[in-house]
Amino acid sequence: MAIGDYPAEYNAKVHGPYDPARFYGKPDTPFGQVRLGEIGSWLSRRNKHPSAVAGAISRGNMSIMKYAKRRSDLNCVGDYPAEYENSILAWWRWQHKYVQPKRAGIAPFFQLVTGAMVFFYVINYAKLSKHKNYKYH
Amino acid sequence: MMTNLFSSFDPTASFNMSLNWLSIFLGLFFIPPAYWLIPSRHLWLWYKIIITLHYEFKTLIGNEKKGSTLMMISLFSMIMFNNILGLCPYIFTSTSHLVMTLSLALPMWFSFMIYGWLNNSTHMFAHLVPQGTPNILMPFMVIIETISNIIRPGTLAIRLAANMIAGHLLMTLLGNTGPNLTLIVLNILLILQILLLILESAVAIIQSYVFAILSTLYSSEIH
């Protein structure tokens, strides 16, 4: 699987148009349904390939996708099946909730700006934290 | 408070790395991606801006060179995002550094010059004497025009960097007087800072536009 390729599990004939927000691999088993003997394989079930990791980060969560669908005046392509996985950063989840709706507001702009300000505050913290100790200025 | 007037322009972050330069790429997150067939309001606004800029630049470039407006629009958006995001607290303004602005202006000017002198030498020579110059002034005009051409990348770079530095400096200096002021003066300062911020937001857009439009004009002079 080279960079930029569709995931190996994706099949255009079965799944229809490719959606970066959808997980095409094996559906996830909820933790409540995992047997004791399967815990080891359940914990290590994720694909650790770099592009799979990037895909997981960019993917979203189904309930919020439905929310985005309701909010936008558009009909999304196809239905969103339960294969959607939770992910940590969820770029597309955020995109569909705040950026992609037809009547999107100014919120995503301020969210990005706030995030950027926090990021640059953190990486400059060592420098900034000394400002209060300056005697002459 | 700062040890140095210019410490808010210091690209060095923690860990002894110039991580603050990362802010150059922040603008990429703000470009709305086209996902649905019908654009969102962000994308629609973005399209509007790009189309307006395209028509602006197209009239200056002329119709022969299709697609070169794309380069100028990208240049404009890159500088604009850097300028505007730099106004937010703690975010580094890369366009306040000559190393950034000159690396945009100089290679572009050089490529225009190389292209022009190699392909349209006569035309480039003719440009050294403006139309209607009296004969006696011609030698001087050549000198003046040559100098004004050579300093172009420098003026382009310094104009942008100086504008960014001036605005930030004014706001940090005024802001740093805050702790020593009485409540009434502090309120006046706050209002003044808000007004300054509005002015600087306008300057951020205007300067990126100026940079792009002048680059377009320089490119139109070589053919």
Image: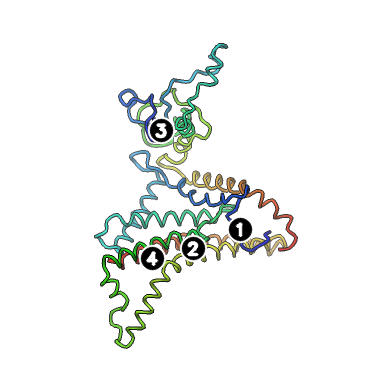
For marks 2 and 1, give the one nearer the viewer.
1
The residue at the point 42 percent across, 46 percent down is B42
Specify whether B7 is left or right of A60.
Answer: right
Chain that bears disc 4: B
Return the mark for residue A106.
Answer: none
Helix, strand or loop under label 1: helix
Q: Could you confirm whether marks 4 and 1 are on the same chain?
A: yes
Mark 1 or mark 4, which is nearer the start of the sequence?
Answer: 1
- On residue B214, which mark appears? 4
Q: Of residues A4 and B170, which is closer to you in this image?
A: A4
The label nearer to you, 3 versus 1, is: 1
Same-chain status of marks 3 and 1: no
Q: Are both tags, 2 and 1, on one chain?
A: yes
Residue count near mark 4 (Cα–Cα under 10 Å), binned few <14, some 14–19, many ≥20: some
> Residue under circle 2?
B203
Please identify the quarter of the rendering in which residue A22 is found. top left
Residue B195 visible to an observer of this rendering: no
Mark 1 sits on what residue? B8
Residue B58 vs residue B10, the one in the foreground: B10
Label 4 close to label 3 by CB (< 8 Å): no
Quickly name the residue at label 3. Answer: A20
How many angstroms separate mark 3 from mark 2 (CA)?
38 Å
Quarter assignment of residue B137: bottom left
